[in-house]
């Protein structure tokens, strides 16, 4: 039986097999592909998009609503909100401070849940004050708006179709 077994030929090493199968052209293409991949990864990790510009309240609200109004109604809306900007800025800063207080209480070890609940309630109260000021301001401007502007302002029926309404 020993005569039936084929003599064992030594297998070439992995490096030797790669050298035989790889031509210089294949190595150049592989190197180019790898370099392009690494360059794309580098560009993708270093180029982060800039955050959108900060727009304080009431600017976000006013511009969102004014986008669907006539020019006259949008000007009235902007005019009534502009004198209130310092009040909005103060309330927004208070709200941010309360939010930071909540975050710092959450990071403390151990968490004082009574203080955390009080801080959350204070932040909620500041947010509620911003909402109430916005509601009062909207109620002040409503009589000066056109019927279509009032409808857009309160979010009533037909306000979703504002792009097809012509601006005057």
Image (cartoon, grey):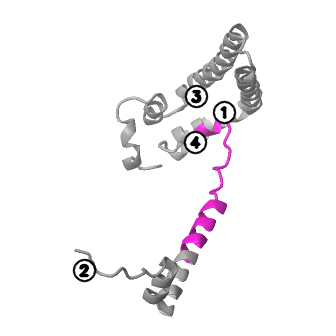
Q: Nearer the viewer, mark 4 or mark 2?
A: 2
Where residue 95 is drawn, which disc sits there?
Answer: none
Q: What range of the chain is rendered magenta?
A: 36-60
Tag 4 near tag 1, CB within 8 Å: no
Query: Disc 1 or 3, which lies upstream in sequence?
Result: 1
Query: Disc 3 or 4, which lies upstream in sequence?
Result: 4
Q: Position of residue 83 (x, y in %)?
A: 73, 32
Q: Position of residue 120 (x, y in %)?
A: 66, 16
Where residue 81 is drawn, which disc sits there?
Answer: 1
The residue that disc 3 covers is 141
Q: Residues within 10 Å of mark 4 (few under 14, many from 20)?
A: some
From mark 4 to mark 1, how far is it between C-alphas?
A: 11 Å
Nearer to me, 118 or 150: 118
Query: Disc 4 or 1, which lies upstream in sequence?
Result: 4
Query: Disc 3 or 2, which lies upstream in sequence?
Result: 2
Q: Nearer the viewer, mark 3 or mark 2?
A: 2
């Amino acid at each position: 039986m020993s005569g039936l077994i084929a003599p064992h030929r030594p297998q070439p090493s992995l490096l030797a097999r790669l050298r035989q199968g790889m031509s210089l052209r294949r190595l150049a293409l592989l190197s180019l592909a790898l370099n392009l991949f690494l360059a794309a990864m580098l560009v993708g990790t270093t180029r982060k998009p800039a955050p959108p510009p900060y727009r304080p309240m009431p600017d976000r609200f006013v511009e969102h609503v004014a986008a669907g109004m006539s020019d006259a109604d949008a000007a009235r809306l902007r005019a009534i909100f502009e004198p209130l900007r310092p009040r909005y800025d103060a309330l927004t800063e208070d709200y941010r401070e309360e939010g930071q207080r909540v975050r710092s209480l959450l990071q403390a070890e151990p968490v004082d849940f009574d203080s955390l609940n009080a801080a959350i309630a204070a932040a909620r109260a500041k947010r509620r004050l911003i909402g109430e000021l916005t509601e009062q301001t909207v109620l002040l401007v409503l009589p000066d708006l056109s019927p279509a502007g009032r409808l857009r302002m309160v979010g009533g029926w037909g306000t979703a179709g504002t792009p097809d309404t012509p601006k005057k």
